[in-house]
Amino acid sequence: MALSTGSNKINTAIFISGTGSNLKSLIKFSKLKKSPIIIKMIISNNPQAKGLQYSKLCKIKKKIFDFKNILSEKKVIDELKKNNIDLICLAGFMKILSKRFIKSFKGKILNIHPSLLPKYKGLNTHEKAIKNKDKYSGCTVHFVNSKLDSGKIINQKKVRIYKFDTPKSLAKRILIQEHKLYPAAIMKMLNL
Ligand code: GRF
């Protein structure tokens, strides 16, 4: 991993589209003394994203971009470079980034996905795991490459699926684990 921590913390941007509970847990983590990251900005494609509230609450700069075309993405890249962003954490970010974008931040983009990858890439992971009568599902943090949910896995956490589970109940239990897994993945990625 080409990130250099030195004595300074890694300038990090969190990309969100919705509730932002992973964002919240990453903010909490970033405030710990041992944390290697500092969250410099929150980026969203969705101006209504609930998670944007943490910008005001935690005094973190926020920016909205529609990510609809190359031009919009170029603006995001410029903004990230301007803010010396060295790590991007996708946290419930529902847009697929272009190859060009990923290349601009090669090895510096992480994603959290609510399944035990390589199982169930894409959407509706909990529905799929329940429908297939899997005993376990879980969550994965991985590097982002140009193929959807296919980059190198950093860490995973298994979560038991019970007979009574609905996609909603399972999602809720997995989300609790996601909040621990993402900070742990950042530490692991940096050999900390
Ligand atoms: C999480 O389950 C994440 O894995 C998935 O979308 C959900 C986002 O939740 N990609 P939140 O916005 O962090 O609360």
Image (cartoon, grey):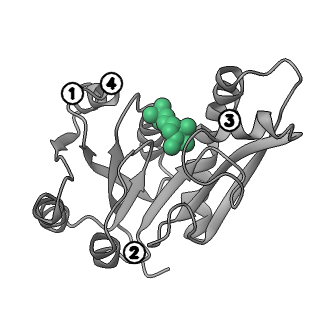
Q: How crowded is mark 3: few (under 14 residues within 10 Å), some or many (20 or more)?
A: many
Q: Are dots 1 and 4 in contact, CB under 8 Å?
A: no
How many numbered discs sit on the rendered protein?
Answer: 4
For this rendering, which residue is in front, 187 or 45? 45
| Left or right of 126 on screen, residue 29 | left
User: If you read the primary sequence from the N terminus, does the residue marked by circle 1 or circle 3 appear first?
Assistant: 1
What kind of residue is marked 1?
Answer: Lys
Give the SS element for disc 2: loop
What kind of residue is marked 3?
Answer: His
Q: How crowded is mark 1: few (under 14 residues within 10 Å), some or many (20 or more)?
A: few
Q: Which of marks 1 and 3 is in front?
A: 3
| Mark pair 4, 3: CA separation | 22 Å
| Left or right of 39 on screen, residue 31 | right
What kind of residue is marked 4?
Answer: Lys
Which disc is residue 126 wearing?
A: 3
Ligand 1 within 8 angstroms of badge 1 C-beta: no
Give the SS element for disc 4: helix
User: If you read the primary sequence from the N terminus, does the residue marked by circle 2 or circle 4 appear first?
Assistant: 2
Above or below: residue 69 compared with residue 48: below
User: If you read the primary sequence from the N terminus, does the residue marked by circle 1 or circle 4 appear first?
Assistant: 4
Percent position (x, y) of residue 10? 36, 63
User: If you read the primary sequence from the N terminus, does the residue marked by circle 2 or circle 1 appear first?
Assistant: 2
Percent position (x, y) of residue 19? 41, 28
The residue singled out by tag 4 in the image is: 50
| Mark pair 2, 1: CA separation | 29 Å
Q: Which residue lies furthest to the bottom in this view?
A: 2
User: If you read the primary sequence from the N terminus, does the residue marked by circle 4 or circle 3 appear first?
Assistant: 4
For this rendering, which residue is in front, 98 or 16? 98
Q: Which residue lies at the image location 82% right of the left edge and 41% below the top edge?
A: 132
The residue singled out by tag 2 in the image is: 6
Which disc is residue 56 wearing?
A: 1
